[in-house]
Amino acid sequence: TLHWFDVCQRRSETEPDQNRIAGFIGSHLLRYQLPDSSLMQRSDAALLHKPHLHRAAAAIDERDFDGAQQHIDTMLSINRVDPQITELLLPRLKAAGRDAQADSLSERLQQTRCVCGRCAECARSASISDSLECSGRD
């Protein structure tokens, strides 16, 4: 049976508005706030940083660069290895003329080192992503 939380997750995959994506993912994760909720599934733990990622993108689009930085800082404290961070935020920052902010983000992402020992491209952080499986390529 399809639950409301799962509908929110599916809607987030097709929604173009960054704030709405953040809202849908946040709503999807609310399932773990219920009194009878189970432990968080690994696939959902990989989503914990996503509301901040999409809110950062929306803030950049709205030229709220301080707000974007707050979401970026929170997002990076949770997950530094999602390739969508680079794909979604760096072009927006550069297009907005925020080269220094883009360079800072890029440096912070590059400071993350692989600890899985299985691949050259896997960047692992000392955060929630340490408990997730390596998604890099050998």
Image (cartoon, rainbow, N blue to C red):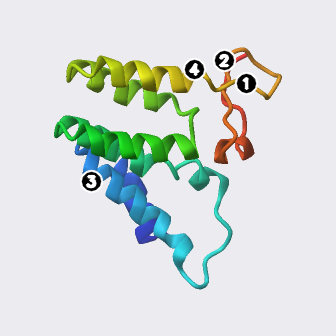
Can you give x and y, in whole percent of width and height, for residue 48 in the image?
52, 53
Tell me the amino acid under the disc marked 2: Glu
Instruction: In the rendered structure, find residue 121 and report the number of the disc placed on it.
Output: 2
Point 36% across, 39% down: residue: 69
Can you give x and y, in whole percent of width and height, for residue 113 in the image?
70, 24
Q: Is residue 118 above or below residue 14?
A: above
Q: Nearer the viewer, residue 126 or 43?
A: 126
> Which mark is first along the chain, 4 or 3?
3
> Which mark is first along the chain, 3 or 2?
3
Instruction: In the rendered structure, find residue 49 and report the number of the disc placed on it.
Output: none
> Which mark is first along the chain, 1 or 3?
3
Q: Nearer the viewer, mark 1 or mark 2?
A: 1
SS under mark 1: loop
Report which residue position mark 4 lands on. Answer: 110
Separation (CA) of disc 4 from disc 1: 10 Å
Tell me the amino acid under the disc marked 4: Gln
> Which mark is first along the chain, 2 or 1?
1
The answer to whether marks 4 and 1 mark residues whose Cβ atoms lie closer than 8 Å is no
Q: Is residue 120 above or below residue 32?
A: above
Tell me the amino acid under the disc marked 3: Arg
Report which residue position mark 3 lands on. Answer: 20
> Which mark is first along the chain, 2 or 4?
4
The answer to whether marks 4 and 2 mark residues whose Cβ atoms lie closer than 8 Å is no
Left or right: 63, with 21 as reference point: left
Instruction: In the rendered structure, find residue 114 and report the number of the disc placed on it.
Output: 1
Q: Nearer the viewer, residue 78 or 98?
A: 98
